[in-house]
Image: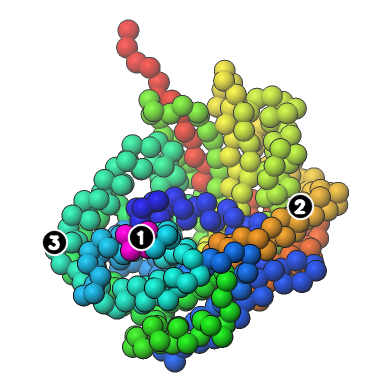
Amino acid sequence: MTPSQGLAACFGILLVALILPGHTASGAVFSPKSFMLKNGMKVVVVTNRRAPVITQMVWYKTGAADEPSGKSGIAHFFEHLMFKGTKTVPSGEFSKIIARNGGRDNAFTSQDYTAYHQTVARDKLELVMRLEADRMRNLVLTDKEVLPERDVVLEERRSRTDNNPGSQLWEASRAALFLNHPYKNPVIGWKHEIDQLTTKDALAFYRRYYVPNNAILIVAGDVDIEQLKPLAEKYYGVIPRGPEIIRERIKEPPQLAGRRVELRSNQVGQPRVSQTFLAPSYATAKGKRAYALLVLAEIFGGSSTAQLYRDLVVEQGIASSAGAWYSPDSLDYGTFGVSVSPRPGVKLAKVEAAMRLATKKLLKNGVSAKELKRAVKSMVASAVYARDSLRAAPNIIGRALSTGRTIEDVETWPEKIKSVTVEDVNAAARAVLRTERSVTAILRKKRRTGG
């Protein structure tokens, strides 16, 4: 993948995070070690000796929701610019050096963080640390480098959003769901604002947010803390600390009316109806609410045995797909969603009515102890596979630390899931599945016109 593919990568990793927590009943999976450099940069080490390979990730606690008003897209745009040159590494050479040394690298941007990663052989660890630390403070940006890359981002937006009805609808849905909070802006940015971004804007963003005390270094693989610490101090520890950054964001007002958005396009192949609800995140939920919502999503629409799929696809035979999800990995608000696509020949209105009826039944009847037991068992069992994944630990830990959570939160995830009760799940459903705090999104084929 190229740097411009970071947005897509981000969504895939988000889904992985829901099933790869970091601790099992038999003991810790990741067993991370951590320390702080004198300049305020947090360092986490996860030893994994399964192969002579390491993954380095540097996470910056800044994303699209931290952008100045009117500068949407600057966080993602700057992700691209980080692959330009420094005084010692010519422009465009960063990834080429990694590739020549048998490695691969990429980056991704979200609403709350930006992350850069490389996977290389164990003996190339010092190389990637030197390269990454170099571009943290020594990036050289001029109009000659910045303005053509802005055109690249605009083309990315055209190809991935402006020419994709599903992406356009998702963008409109987010803008309707969040009335005031910056999560309403797309990560890639609005076209008219991307078009106005300048080298001055990029340098200001860089100098403010790309400082060691706003970053987290995570290294996973065939390395231990004794080997890593001197390297971290040598390359990252010498970078001057920057001004303290306080992430103050405007809040959502009380939401009193449900919203509805509809997009018709000749490009639509498969119609779809979804309803997305405003929900708390891991960082903002009280008690076990976030964990109860994860279990709720699994029971209601997480698999082919879930309530929604069994009802609309198997029993009624009116839908080709049906599912539910919960996205809790945000610094501020999370979302809970339900989505259904009709079978060929079935009216979209019919599956929408069935989806709403299924949600009403869930609220009225709740979930059963049997469903809870099956869901929890499946979710906790999935955590075991995190032990074998080199990418899982740095991705999950980095996301947590970038959004107000701790390593302990990651390590105790299965225990918290196992503590969820039927009452917790049903209470979470009643609290979150409220029409006045939701957006219904309709994607359908454009009507034919003419004689």
**Cβ–Cβ under 8 Å for marks 2 and 1:** no
What's the amino acid at mark 2?
Ser
The residue at which mark 3 appears reads as 144
What's the amino acid at mark 1?
Arg
Residue 47: x, y in percent? 61, 73
Residue 262: x, y in percent? 44, 36
Residue 352: image tag: none
What's the amino acid at mark 3?
Lys
Res 249 seen here = no
Q: Residues within 10 Å of mark 1 (few under 14, many from 20)?
A: few
Residue occupying the point 44% across, 44% down: 170
Secondary structure category for the residue under label 2: helix
Q: Is residue 55 above or below residue 431?
A: below
Q: Is residue 303 above or below residue 133?
A: above
The residue at which mark 1 appears reads as 100
Q: Is residue 317 above or below residue 340?
A: above
Task: Give the magenta range.
Answer: 95-100
Q: Judge by depth and name the residue closer to the eye, 112 or 52.
A: 52
Q: Judge by depth and name the residue closer to the eye, 53 or 220.
A: 53
Residue 40 occupies which quadrant of the picture?
bottom left
Residue occupying the point 36% across, 88% down: 238
